[in-house]
Structures are given as structure tokens and as C-alpha cells.
Image (tube, grey):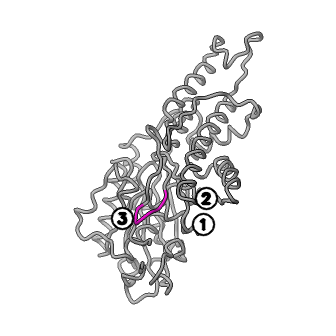
Amino acid sequence: MVNLNAVAPGGGREYYVALGLEGSANKLGVGVVKHPVVGKHEGGDFSYDCESQILSNVRDTYITPAGEGFLPRDTARHHKNWCVRLIKQALEEAGIQNAAKDLDVICFTKGPGMGAPLHSVVVAARTCSLLWGVPLVGVNHCVGHIEMGREITKAVDPVVLYVSGGNTQVIAYSEKRYRIFGETLDIAIGNCLDRFARTLRISNYPSPGYNIEQLALNCKKKDTLLELPYTVKGMDLSMSGILAYIDNLAKDLFRDNRKNRQLFDRDSDEAKISVEDLCFALQENLFAMLVEITERAMAHVNSNQVLIVGGVGCNLRLQEMMQQMCQDRANGQVHATDERFCIDNGVMIAHAGLLQYRMGDFVKDLSETVVTQKFRTDEVYVAWRE
């Protein structure tokens, strides 16, 4: 039996309010979420339906010039510069007049992520906690994505495909843990797309992956897919070799290397492949690999529901390919959200942290707030689910 009302809200209120701080990569997000006290939460697994109200969800992204990635030091500097402003903005939008009285808990990303940005955000979280006398909760970034996706879509017990710049995992829940069925053996899919965008020297605004998606839509040779390596290994996949292969193709295209007969016609010496074709082929190849391992996980746990979370989950082509697979499996269903919740945000940290807090799991000593770059999804004890 799960009792989500194990800890009463502060001030005699009939609702909980949490502030969430997220800064594990180049996006700094601050959000405020409200959970009403609901009778059904005292017995049963209703963590997917907390009747949450999002009071604010603000975000600022550290954008680098085309062809460049973001370094931990520079990203941390961005977060330090913007953190106080975003916290003030989020509290103002949420109508929080007195944080010390109106907040039940402050939630922060404990990991995984980039060390320096994580540290910048947890310092802000500790400071606010000490100033206002509000308890802290450290949240696993991946679990934050999962719980936000479940709350928004009302997916009860789906197989989860978590795809972002730092993680690629196929996950299913069992016995108080989010079990990892398959994952990348090297780089994450978001990192693969971002690095290819750097090779193409396309803009990092609003995000490299989105810009690759738009280029792929303009591919005029979708019926003749460029052949790329396909590396699924059981339930795992590898993307570094695919990236190296298509990087070389792009460089040969830019150098006008007519000796590459995969790119140039043997008779006319004219280019057969465009940048748009490369983007389309890369997306199709990577997404087909993800669909394959997700379907295998669904068969293993006898599920017909998929929840896609993480920044790459915004990609409409990925959602479409997953939907086609699910429809072939007894009218399965794909659950996904838009960029407000797929991309890193403070609300997901506030929501997942509030679930932990309501089960009595919060920081007892500041020594428990040390952030970590390595924090696997299956390390988290999921007390709020049966």
C-alpha cells in the first residue's frame, strides 16, 4: 500500500508546493508545481495522477556558436549568472509571496549530468533552503523525466524510452525500481545528433537536434535511403561508429571529394546526396534501432504502451515510427509530451521531488546534497509506486 499523504503539507494547507531547480546540462530550468491532497492517494498506486498544477516553468538555455559544443565551465558560469533571476521569475509567476511559508520543499537535480553545472545549481538550492528554512530533496534527472511524462500523459505502467543528450535507455518498472532493459554502449542519441550538427556547422538555436529534424523533412530522396551502419547488440545499441561513418561522408561532401562514389555519380560526377539526405538517413537509422529494442522490451514485459521522454522525445518522426510499431502490437499506444516537458525543465524536478517528499524522503543533512555525474536510473528506490 502506498500512502502519498504520509507527510502533511505545511501551514495546514490542503496542497503541497515544490520549487524545482534543473541544471544538469546547458539548460537552466526553474519550476513550481502544486499537488492537492487527494483521498485516493492514501491507498493505491496513483502516482501517475497527482492532479498536478504547474504554477510556473521558466528556462534559459546556454547557446554556443554554430559548430561548437558547450563546455562545463562556461555552462556553469551561465547557470550562476541566471539562477537567481529565474528563481525570482518562477516564484513571481507562481504567485509565491512568502517562500518560507508557501513552499513545502526545494528540489534539485542530484545527477546524472555535467559536474560544474550541477554544482552551480545545488549551491543555489542549499542557499534558498537555509534562507527560507525549507527542506531539500535531491532528484535523479532520469526519474524526473519519467515521472513528469507519466503525470502529463497519465500513462499508468508503460515501457519508457528515455532519449536525451546524455542518456539513451529502455526502461520498465518492477519492484520499486526503474529497471534498465537496454541502453547505449557509448554515446547517447542526443549527443550523436548534436555532434553531427557541429560537423554540418548548423545553428545550435533552438537546438541542434531540432534543426537536423527540419533538414530531414526537406529530404527529396526518402525512397532511396542512404545505407548506414546498423548496430543493435541484443538489447543495447551503439552509435559512435554510425556517427564516425556519416561524419566522414559529410566531410567528403563539403570537400567535393568526387572519389567517394557513395556521394557522387560515377558518370556525371554530380552529387547524388545532399545534407538533407544525410540528416534524414541518420534519423531513420537511429530511430529504427530505438524502435527495435523498445519493441523487444515491450514483448518481455507484455506491455502495449510506450512513454517517450527526454529532449529527443520531441522529435515527431521518432514518435511516428514508434506509433507505427505500437499499432502492430494489439493497438498499442505511444505517450509523449511537447518541448515544455520533454526538454530539461525545473517542473519535472519539482514534481518527482515532491513525490519523494510526500513519502518522507528528504535531505536530513547537507552532506546528502553532494551532486554526482554518475547516478543510474535503477539506483533510485521508487517508494511512491507499488
Q: Which mark is residue 60?
A: none
Q: Residue 155 colored magenta?
A: no
In the rendered view, would you say 250 is above or below 156? above
Q: Are marks 1 and 2 in contact (CB under 8 Å)?
A: yes
Q: Is residue 337 visible?
A: no
Q: Which residue is mark 2?
A: 336
**Residue bearing mark 1:** 153
Left or right: 130, with 141 as reference point: left
Give the crowd class for mark 2: few <14, some 14-19, many >=20 residues within 10 Å. many
Q: Which residues are magenta?
A: 172-177
Depth check: give the residue in front, 137 or 90.
137
Q: Residue 289: x and y, percent?
A: 58, 41
Q: Residue furthest bottom?
A: 12
**Mark toward the viewer: 2 or 3:** 3
Badge 3 amino acid:
Tyr
Q: Earlier in the sequence, mark 1 or mark 2?
A: 1
Local packing at callout 3 (Cα closer than 10 Å; few below 14, some 14-19, many 20+) is few
Residue 372 in the figure: left or right of residue 27: left
Who's the residue at 47% across and 52% down the image?
Answer: 27
Whether residue 154 is situated above or below residue 101 in the rendered picture: above
